[in-house]
Image (cartoon, grey):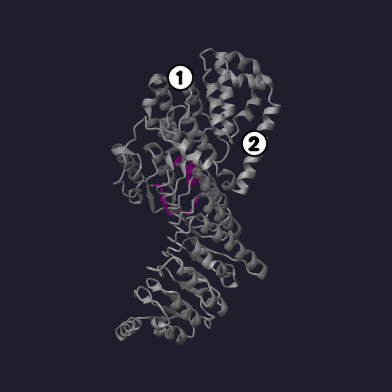
Amino acid sequence: MASDDIAELVDSLANTHVGDGELSFKGLGLKLDNAESVEELVQEIEQCQDLRALRLEGNTLGVEAAVAIAQALESKHWLQCCYWSDLFTGRLRSEIPKALVYQESLSSGIMMAGARLTVLDLSDNAFGPDGVRGIQQLLKSPTCHTLKELRLNNCGMGIGGGKILAEALMECHRSSVTAGAALKLRIFVAGRNRLENEGSSALAKAFQLMGSLEEVHMPQNGINYAGVITLASAIRHNSELRVLNLNDNTFTKRGTLAMAQALGHLRNVQVINFGDCLVRCEGAIALAAVLREGLPILKELNLSFGEIKEAAALVVAQAVMDKPYMEKVDLNGNFLGEDGCEGLREAMESQDKAVMLASLSDDEGEPDDDDDDDDDNDEGEAAANDDCCNGEEFGKENALLEKEDSSSKCHCPDEVLSFVACPSAEKLLQLGEMTRHLLPEVDMTNPHKAADVLLKVASLYSEKPVIQTAVLETFDMLLKKLLSGSAFQAYTFLSTLLVLMGILRGEGKTKKVPLVAGQLLCLEHAVQQDYFAQHHASLIHIVLSKNRDALNLCSSSMERLSSALEKRCLYQH
């Protein structure tokens, strides 16, 4: 090394912070190629007797220099925190594993010391799957049995790296349990890694096994609904989860419903970031249900750039109004339009919550009505991965539901099946007490089918007293069951019902039912009944008030329904 370079290194190390066991070379921009180039740095490490944290971020480290540092670390038994992000800038990808794992590498030095790490940060090192192989022995070793934070943001791991990492974490957990103290990883960061469905699903198995996560950050990983479903099935087993950041992945309806259902099991979540995830209207309403029923200490909710329209945004806003710790709700970049943005601001201001609403400066405006969501393609591309990505628990649940559904069909009278296939007032009257056998036909495991059956019954509404009574009694019986479950189930059903009626924009090319006045009149009757909760009426009132044009052909019945809803909502306040 030239004398000028040595002098520059000495000057840099003069600013090194040593205190509380921390030695920091952060951001010095050092080019450390060989043993000579790290002589002063190694000396600093050797002289720090109680080294607990080593910061090397923002330098560039070669293999020979890594070997020299590793030798210095072999005696550092108290080392706990390795902050080694952005450490290999300008290095060949083939060099990084050698620096991390091979004989006399950084990893082997730490393991030889018998250190017990709590923090390992290797973010912003584009090492790919080979780099993950470079740390897998470290992750499996007793050195990582005590790991609390693992940060691998922007490392280009890919699907293969995600699988290797998941296997290493599960092995670490298994060996730590055998050793008497289970691995309790609290913070996991792996954004911008191209994990996709397979990589994220492999990691989901590790998350479920550990069950100790408090923060999960996996933004921008190319995950679509199939991978989101497996993550959801794992997340629900991490009861201490506080922060969930899956920004810039692709949920669509199926992924959002699964994630909303999982969040319903958690009580400690404070931050949810589902921005740029295509949550859309039905997904937003499902999340609103969870907000209304759970998540008691939530502080931040990000649903920006999710193709959410005004009505669904207002349902979300209403659901967060009573959250005592709520600080920020971000609905920017959605399909609200100028009037929608103003309506949302007014709604928040009316409850003295305007400060909670983030900027709406990037709103996308109202979408064209004929601009159908192309979810058939989105879901079709992921369908091939369903078998490996749906999660063991989710698969068991679906199998059980299918079994129950087929069982109900076997015991359903022919008269009932005939009515469902081709409903008529005459058939309904002939059913008499057998109408109770319609209840299995409106199972919440299939809200689309349930809504279809309910609307078929309502379509038979007539001014003839005997028919009207039969229709309303049957309608009440079915709807009471459908709204008697959790808020999540009820909101999922109601949003599906509104989509079928053409009042709410749904995903894909949903075939809407022919709308008739009787369906609206049955709803008018229902909203006045005790079983119809006020917040259910509020949901329908918000959506209907923002999509009145959809009911132009039934304007008289629509006005009656609107009036009943408005009275119920006024009574609520």
Q: Residue 508 location in percent, x, y?
A: 45, 33
Q: Is residue 127 above or below residue 315?
A: below
Q: Which residues are magenta?
A: 284-303
The residue that appears at 61% across and 19% down in the rendered structure is 419
User: Split into 4 quadrants, where in the image is the N terminus?
Assistant: bottom left
The secondary element bearing badge 1 is classed as: helix
**Mark 2 closeness class: few <14, some 14–19, many ≥20 residues within 10 Å:** few
Question: In this figure, which residue is indicated by the disc labeled 1?
Answer: 517
Q: Residue at x 34, y 35 (%)?
A: 367
Q: Quadrant of residue 59?
A: bottom left
Are the residues tagged 1 and 2 within 8 Å (C-beta)? no
- From where the camera sits, is residue 534 visible? no
Residue 500 picture location, percent across and down: 48, 28
Q: Earlier in the sequence, mark 1 or mark 2?
A: 2
Was residue 299 drawn as part of the magenta stretch in this picture? yes
Q: Write down the residue under mark 2.
A: 402
Q: Is residue 473 above or below residue 252?
A: above
